[in-house]
Image (cartoon, rainbow, N blue to C red):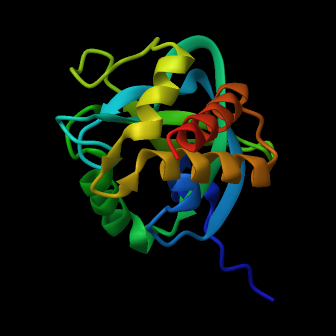
Amino acid sequence: MTDTRHNAQEMLWVFGYGSLMWNPGFAYEERVLASLPGYARTFCMWSIHHRGTEENPGLVLALDPHEDAHCRGLGFAVAPEQEEATLAYLRERELISSAYLETWVTLELADGRDVRAVAYVVDTEHVQYCGGLPLEKQADVIAHAVGGRGPNTEYLYNTQSHLDELGIEDDDLRWLAERVRQLTELRG
């Protein structure tokens, strides 16, 4: 029997830490738990397209640089023949307002491999960057915002649900999901 998988270093790897975990939108050959040192997954970017509007921005997750942090998510391996189409798709999806920077990082896979991967990191100089918002403010924004891809609550709940399925602990996201549920129940 011949192993048709490509060498991990020859493949395009993509790091998913938010909606890419539950809605990658591209074909992949391998999906592995992964960790990215030096970044935290936070709601630190105003969403004026997908989960909010310019008049009523929502919040989306981004990789925010933090020296002592480790963001856990998924590494997706893309076959060489799909690399160009995948990058084009990701650029159209993730670089809609230039608030993310396409960044090549070293991703630590749960099986012990280190691979070069593309990740979308927030541009801390961009007008949409809002790092350091208190969790209560984040919850209030998420509970009310709706954008072109639907309610901000859906984005939060789907991400939290998939983190739970993968066994990835994220105390801030868990707190936010519980608080947003309370806020949406209060407004009926």
Q: Which residue is drawn at 54% across and 19% down?
A: 136
Q: Residue at x 73, y 27 (%)?
A: 171
Counting from the top left corner in percent of width and height, residue 53 is at 22, 41
**Residue 136 relative to residue 173: left or right:** left
The image quarter containing residue 150 is: bottom left
Q: How many marks?
A: 0
Pick the front one: 117 or 130? 130
- Which residue is more in the foreground, 108 or 97? 97
Please say whether residue 9 is visible from this viewpoint.
no
The residue that appears at 55% across and 13% down in the rendered structure is: 66
Residue 130 seen in render: yes
Quadrant of the image occupied by residue 52: top left
In the rendered image, the quadrant that contains the N terminus is: bottom right
Is 65 displayed left or right of 77 in the figure? left
Q: Which residue is drawn at 53% across and 58% down?
A: 10
Q: Is 1 positioned to the left or the right of 178 in the image?
A: right
Quadrant housing residue 148: bottom left
Residue 185 position, x and y percent, is 59, 43
Q: Where is residue 125 in the image (x, y as percent from the top left)?
A: 25, 15
Q: Position of residue 81 (x, y in %)?
A: 41, 74
Say if 143 sits above or below 87 in the image. above
Vertical placement of residue 13 versus 95, above or below: below
Relative to 137, residue 16 above or below: below
